[in-house]
Every structure is written in C-alpha cells, then in structure tokens.
Image (tube, helix red, strand yellow):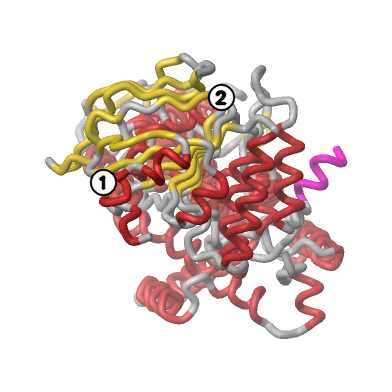
C-alpha cells in the first residue's frame, strides 16, 4: 500500500507536493458534492465533458510518455461502442447484459489493438509511419460501418444502421439499477479519477521509466536489455483499452453511435486535447480534455457553427507558441515560489 | 589463449553495395582489455553494431560465450552479458541523471557477475555521478555524459562492454581518469573492447590491439608488436 502511494506521488507527472494533493482532494470532493445544486440535465452534460478523459489519458501514455503518436485512437473508441451496442442490445431484459457488453467491448478492443500493434511493432515499422497507419485503420472502420445500412447488417436483434448509426443502445446497469442522470455522472467521475490515479502509478513504476527511455531513444533502450517491441505493444493495448472505456461511456451516455465517431474529425480531437494541455503530463491532459470538451459542447449548443474552427485555431496557436502544451508550460515556467511548491516540479540540482 | 568470451567468424556486412566489414575474424579472451584502431571508415563501428545486434551480418557468425547469437535481437544479447556505448553519446539527454540510471534493466540472470554492483558503484563514485540527481542529463558537461552512459551500461551487470570512442572530446585529465576507471574495472574481471583514436590512451590501457583497415582485420598483437608493425605505422600510425 505504501509502495503504491509512493508510486502515486512519484516524479513523472506535475503536481507532487502536499499542497497539490490537498487541492486534488478538495476538487474531487467538490465534484462529488456540487451536482446537489445542478439539474439532472446539467449533471448529464458535465458527465459528457469527463467521459473523453480516458481516451485522452491513454493517448498521453502512448504519445507523451512512450513516444508513439496514434492518430486513430477513435477506432478503439468505436469498436468498444459498437460491440457494447451489439452485445448489450441482444441481451435486453438481462440485468447483466450491459456488464457483459462492456467486458466484450474492452476485450475486442484489446484483441484488435494487439493484432494491429503486433504487426506494427514486431515489424519494426518506423515511428513516423504509425500515425498514418492508425488513422487509416480508423478511416477503414468508418467506411465499413458507413455501408452497413441494409437489413442484412443485422446482428441478432441489433441493426448496425449505416451512416445513421446504431440507436437504442442500453444504458449501463448494475443488477436492476440503471445508471443514468445523476448516477451516470458519478459513475463517469469515479472511472476518470481511478483511471488518472492508476496511470500515475503506472508512469512512476519501473515500467513507466522504461516507457520514457523508449520515447527518448528506442535503440539505446533495447541495448539496456529491454524488448522494446513487447513494451510498446503493451502500452499500445493499454491506450486502446482506455479509448474503449471512453467509447463505452459515450454509448451508455447517448444511447447511440454513428460511424462519424471513428471518422477523420473525431480522430483528430484526442490529439488536440492532448497537445493543448501537454502530452508529457497526465494531469495537464486531464484538465485540457475537460476544458476543451466543455468549450466545444458549450459553443455548439449555443448554436455557434464555428466550435471546431476555434478548437483548430487553438491547436495551431499551441503548436506555435506552446509546443510542450499550455498547462505543462505554465506549470514549468511561472516564476513564483508558491506555484512551484504547488506543482512540485524539481529544479535541477547539481549532478 | 583462454576461452574466448566473444568471437566472430567471417563477418561480412555491406550497406547498399558498400562493404563495411569484410570477413572479420576476432577472438577476445575473457578478462582482456582490447583496443580496436583503424582509420575512419575501417569498419570499427559497424563491427560493434554487428556484435551487439543493431545490424545483422550478411554472412558470418557472432559467438558470445560459446553461444551463436548471430540472429538474436540486441536485447537478448544484452541479457547474456554484453553492453555497448555509442560513438555519439546516447544517454537520454532530456531525462534526469536519476531517470537515466533507473531505466536500466537489472536482469536477475544466473550468471550475472557477483561484483556487478560493486563495479557500478565504483564507476559512479569515481565518475562523481549522483544516482538521485534530478539534473537533466543534457546539462552535464560532455565528459560526464560519456561517463553517465558508461555507468548505465555497467548498471545492467555486463560481462563484456564495447565502448566506441569513449574519450572523444575529453581533456587529457578526463581521458586519464577514464583510462584509470576502465583499467580498474578490467582488473576486476570485466572484459572491455574499446574503439579509440587516441594513441596515448590506447598505449595506456590496451593489452592487445586489433587494427582494422578497409573492413578487414589488418593486424593484431600486443601494444609493442603493433607499434613496431611497419605496415600499421604506414597506414595508421604514420603520423606519430
């Protein structure tokens, strides 16, 4: 237990002072309490800002910590969503249908990622090609799902639905208790907090240190005795499962999914969330993902057609002026002692 | 000659038709400190990359402790006790000294040398490196970066290390200090192969010298034999 605590507070993410954890606990408490003042509709909206956090954290792990940029994480988002829809949809009336559906969704995600990743990493495909391959997989999936409109594309009682997508996907439920509204908000919040803490433990573990080494120089790392192919594959599968978690939450939230969820536009969004916050910090990615989803949702629901243009401009600005991400840059460069104490960044001391 | 820890048979490697090594045969006994010298382009670095598995030879064999490792990937050779530092420093420059040293796989293998940890701590101590330092490696002066990479390799507990021009760019004092550490490590039983241009350094540390020229082993012998070798003087030491 104390070992886990030590890993949790380890040095591979910003925010490691006592102050930080005090603020973290305070914010979590606030997030648990404040739906009391919200309508159920608002609580459901807030859940939407959070449900993309796992896919973004997975991409931060893969890209920021392990140096592999995937442009197609939405493929696993979609696979989990569709598989859940098919399995749970065929088990309506069964109290365990959604649970079985979720597990199947994640399992198929993991298997698909393992197969794809095996060829990429064991084939020693060069790093710069990986974003293209992952994006192509995602676009293939979109094209395939788009042509499933006919009645022959029915699995059991569930219709894949072509570009109109799959509708009537069951909400999650535990026993007879259907998770929707307020309870859905708490369900998502708990998953997000657990995912963040678990990944912090991972990046501070010995496995995490090797991920950083692979990011910096794969050949040097292999010559320290590591099978970098297997290591990268494992991280890739973990990131895919994280994307799958977001896919599950998405279909359980909206009860539908369309092929555009695995299309080009959606594929670019996780990369933007991660880049804007700062890919080398899980905390930064957590915050930027929530903020950008809130921004996008608010702008679109206010009727602005330009929401994605604003997000795109933000990406360009960040790439030009904050190549390490806005939050990471702020955490590192704000010259205030109190701030340093909060984020707990080490300043290099003499070697 | 005692049993060789590392041996090659007829190693041939060409890149796009350019022959980098041609029928290289070397045999390094356990516990030796061997220097490999030769003009630029003689195939020294290519030989190292074939020995540790970065490249596969077009023909020939690499035998590590009597085991044919020619087709083993690099990490499996490292796990059998080989270590390598690169010609251009490849410590993880953006990571801290602590992260660099903690990224090394300390393999729990049966034949890990009993004094591997002693060697590692000795090197850290003599190189003046703090394993807990949060200083980014890129802020270290050049010679300490070289020492950091050597220390990383030692942390894995190798039986044999290959150092590609470890003292390039170092001052005379730094070179002497590096030589002293390597000689001590060697005296504790570690086999060391060094590619080096610095003749004074080679004379100081080498027990035997292999001279490479145009991808082949041109000559091999003790320091005295090589420095007296007329053809070696002509192609390589002529300027001395």
Farthest residue to the left: give it. B17
The residue depicted at 15 percent of the width and 43 percent of the height is: B18
Estimate the x, y position of residue B15 in percent, counting from the top left.
19, 42
Residue A312 falls in image quadrant: bottom left
The residue depicted at 42 percent of the width and 55 percent of the height is: B197
> Observer-nearest residue: A259 or B105?
B105
SS at circle 1: helix
SS at circle 2: loop
Magenta segment, principal secondary structure? helix
> Observer-nearest residue: B88 or A134?
B88
User: Where the C terminus of chain A falls, by quadrant?
Assistant: bottom right
Q: Is residue B40 above or below residue B183?
A: below
Q: Is residue A280 above or below residue B5?
A: below
Q: CA distance from mark 1 to mark 2?
A: 52 Å
Q: Is residue A293 above or below residue A92?
A: below
Residue bearing the label numbered 1: A136
Residue bearing the label numbered 2: B30
Q: Is residue B85 above or below residue A273?
A: above
Q: Is residue B169 left or right of residue A191?
A: left
Q: Is residue A162 shown in magenta?
A: no
Q: From which residue to which does the magenta span run?
A: A1-8
């Amino acid at each position: 237990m104390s070992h886990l605590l030590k890993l949790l507070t380890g040095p591979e993410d910003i925010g490691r002072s006592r102050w930080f954890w005090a603020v973290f606990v305070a914010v979590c408490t606030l997030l648990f309490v404040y739906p009391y003042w919200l309508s159920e509709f608002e609580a459901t909206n807030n859940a939407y800002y959070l449900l993309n956090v796992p896919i973004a954290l997975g991409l931060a792990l893969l890209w920021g910590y392990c140096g592999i940029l995937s442009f197609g994480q939405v493929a696993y988002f979609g696979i989990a969503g569709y598989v859940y829809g098919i399995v749970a949809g065929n088990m309506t009336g069964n109290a365990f249908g959604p649970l079985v559906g979720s597990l199947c969704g994640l399992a198929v995600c993991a298997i698909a990622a393992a197969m794809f990743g095996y060829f990429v990493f064991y084939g020693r495909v060069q790093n710069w090609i990986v974003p293209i391959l992952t994006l192509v997989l995602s676009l293939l999936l979109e094209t395939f799902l788009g042509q499933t409109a006919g009645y022959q594309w029915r699995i059991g009682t569930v219709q894949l639905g072509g570009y109109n997508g799959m509708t009537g996907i069951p909400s999650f439920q535990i026993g007879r208790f259907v998770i929707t509204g307020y309870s859905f908000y708490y369900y998502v919040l708990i998953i997000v907090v657990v995912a963040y803490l678990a990944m912090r433990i991972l990046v501070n573990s010995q496995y995490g240190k090797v991920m950083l080494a692979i990011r910096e120089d794969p050949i040097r790392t292999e010559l320290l005795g590591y099978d970098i192919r297997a290591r990268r594959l494992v991280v890739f599968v973990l990131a895919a499962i994280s994307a799958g978690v977001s896919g599950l939450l998405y279909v359980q939230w909206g009860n539908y999914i369309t092929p555009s969820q695995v299309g080009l536009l959606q594929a670019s969004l996780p990369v933007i969330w991660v880049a804007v916050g700062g890919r080398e910090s899980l905390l930064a990615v957590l915050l930027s993902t929530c903020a950008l989803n809130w921004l996008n949702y608010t702008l679109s629901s206010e009727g602005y057609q330009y929401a994605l243009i604003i997000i795109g401009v933000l990406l360009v600005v960040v790439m030009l002026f904050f190549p390490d991400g806005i939050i990471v840059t702020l955490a590192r460069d704000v010259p205030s002692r109190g701030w340093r104490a909060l984020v707990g960044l080490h300043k290099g001391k003499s070697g | 000659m005692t049993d060789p820890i590392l041996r090659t048979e007829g190693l041939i490697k060409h890149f796009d038709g350019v022959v980098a090594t041609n029928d290289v045969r070397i045999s390094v006994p356990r516990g030796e400190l061997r220097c490999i010298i030769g003009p630029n382009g003689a195939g020294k670095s290519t030989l190292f990359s074939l020995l540790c598995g970065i490249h596969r030879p077009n023909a020939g064999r690499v035998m590590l402790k009597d085991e044919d490792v020619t087709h083993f990937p690099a990490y499996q050779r490292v796990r059998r006790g080989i270590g390598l530092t690169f010609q251009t420093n490849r410590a993880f420059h953006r990571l801290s000294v602590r992260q660099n040293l903690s990224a090394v796989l300390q393999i729990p293998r049966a034949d890990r040398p009993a004094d591997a940890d002693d060697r590692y701590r000795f090197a850290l101590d003599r190189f003046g490196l703090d394993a807990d330092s949060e200083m980014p490696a890129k802020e270290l002066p050049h010679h300490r970066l070289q020492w950091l990479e050597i220390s990383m390799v030692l942390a894995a507990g190798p039986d044999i290390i290959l150092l590609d021009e470890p003292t390039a760019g170092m001052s005379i004092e730094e070179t002497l200090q590096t030589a002293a550490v390597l000689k001590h490590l060697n005296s504790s039983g570690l086999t060391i192969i060094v590619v080096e241009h610095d003749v004074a350094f080679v004379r100081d540390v080498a027990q035997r010298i292999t001279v490479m020229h145009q991808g082949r082993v041109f000559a091999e012998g003790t320091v005295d034999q090589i420095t007296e070798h007329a053809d070696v003087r002509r192609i390589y030491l002529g300027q001395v």
